[in-house]
Amino acid sequence: MSHSKVKARTPASVITSPEQALNVARELAQAFRVESAQRDRLRQLPFKQLEALFASGLGAITVPEDFGGVAVPTAVLAQVIAILSEADAAIGQIPQNHFYALEVLRVNGSDAQQRRFYQEVLEGIHLGNALAEFSSAAAHYRTTSVLPDGDGYLLQGKKFYATGALFADRIPTAARDAEGKEQLVFVPRHQANVTVIDDWSGFGQRTTGSGTVIFDRVRVTADDIVPFQSAFERPSTVGPFAQIMHAAIDQGIARAAFSDMLNFINTRARPWPDSGVDRASEDPLTIDRVGQLAARLQAGDALLEEAGETIDAAQRHPDASHVAEASVQVASARAWTTEVALEAANLLFELSGTRSALREHNLDRHWRNARTHTLHDPVRWKYPVIGNYVLNGVLPPRRGTL
């Protein structure tokens, strides 16, 4: 049974430097921002926007140089995700799983698998995900299986929260083999017996397409199966790499809320009652809150930069010490951007009131997006890990949420 082949719908451009990656992200963000409020309000899924994103070459910016990529620093990837998320938080979240799967491939894939999948990504292939299971006993437990059948394997199971699967060309899927070991199966999206259902109905991040995927005896090859569980049985950057992108999504949401808040204050907001000023932008209380939030946003950028550098160091030296440092630094950034995203969205809501939901502005989407996305690996998991490391020298557990 020969391995599966997938072709991109639109051939991708080639990005050759971190600076070019950031410029392309800014150009795309400018276009994505135009109708982002409308897409959220009407739940218009961003098929065309994602096709443009992957055709731009951004999907390949973490491909190692030995395989023809540019391998941008992790901090640059975080900037790209934040830029896209500021324009449209759903579009910013969707590629997270794409880059996560590529990191698993880098850490655990065979040379042949790396050459094949990296080449597909360089050509514009979009990877989705099918990891979580809605009915499993615990978040980390999966019942989906990939078992031998003749000269190949059969994949069987049902997934939920499958962000990006609806738009993808391949769907990396977590499944257990005959020995109970977890594997990541790079399933072609349009393989026979693969069903992707658009049943995501969250009140935030409404257009991520994070619905259900059903695999009904789907035939796959050994070449499509990359070891997954072993990435957490030894020190690796898979966990912190995944988490820094989530932190960047929250930072982008915070920036969007802050930008719309400034615009609201300067164009539509009224001063606080009895403030003694004619314009809301001159009110001392408003000025104070804006100043505090501006400083916290800047600190978030710095934390993402530092966390990205520790991930790069851990990729070069994947020992317990470097990986623990990366996990703790990313947890700090994630906790910070979680709180800043909620603070920025709350302040926008506080100042704009019920008018934030007006059809032409839809400003409440920032609060809904922040409230929804920050529940992804909640911040309450981060602080005990950080504290135990700082106080007692206890290394963080190795998992995708840290």
Image: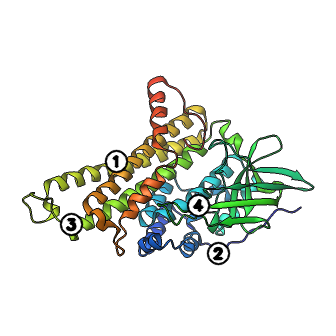
Q: Nearer the viewer, residue 147 or 170?
A: 147
Mark nearest the camera among 3 and 1 is 3
**Which of the image's four quarters has the C terminus?**
top right
Mark nearest the camera among 3 and 2 is 3
Which of the marked residues, 4 or 2, is nearer the chain's N terminus? 2
Q: Residues within 10 Å of mark 1 (few under 14, many from 20)?
A: some
Which of the marked residues, 3 or 1, is nearer the chain's N terminus? 3
Residue corresponding to mark 4:
210
Q: Residues within 10 Å of mark 2 (few under 14, many from 20)?
A: some
The residue shown at (59%, 59%) is: 163
Which of the marked residues, 3 or 4, is nearer the chain's N terminus? 4
Cα–Cα span, label 3 and label 2 = 46 Å
Cα–Cα span, label 3 and label 4 = 35 Å
- What element does badge 1 sit on? helix
Snapshot quadrant of residue 273: bottom left
Q: Residue furthest right?
A: 150
- What element does badge 2 sit on? loop
The amino acid marked with disc number 3 is Ala
Where does residue 87 sit, x and y in percent of width and height? 42, 67
Q: Is residue 108 left or right of residue 343?
A: right
The amino acid marked with disc number 2 is Pro
**Which of the image's four quarters has the N terminus?**
bottom right
Tell me if residue 154 can be seen. yes
Q: Is residue 155 left or right of residue 305?
A: right
Numbered mark located on residue 299 in the image: 1
Q: Is residue 130 left or right of residue 255?
A: right
The residue shown at (37%, 63%) is: 364
Cα–Cα span, label 3 and label 1 = 27 Å
The amino acid marked with disc number 4 is Ser
- Residues at circles 3 and 1 in contact by the CB criterion of under 8 Å: no
Query: Compared with residue 57, is residue 160 higher up or lower down, i.e. above or below?
Result: above
Cα–Cα span, label 1 and label 2 = 38 Å
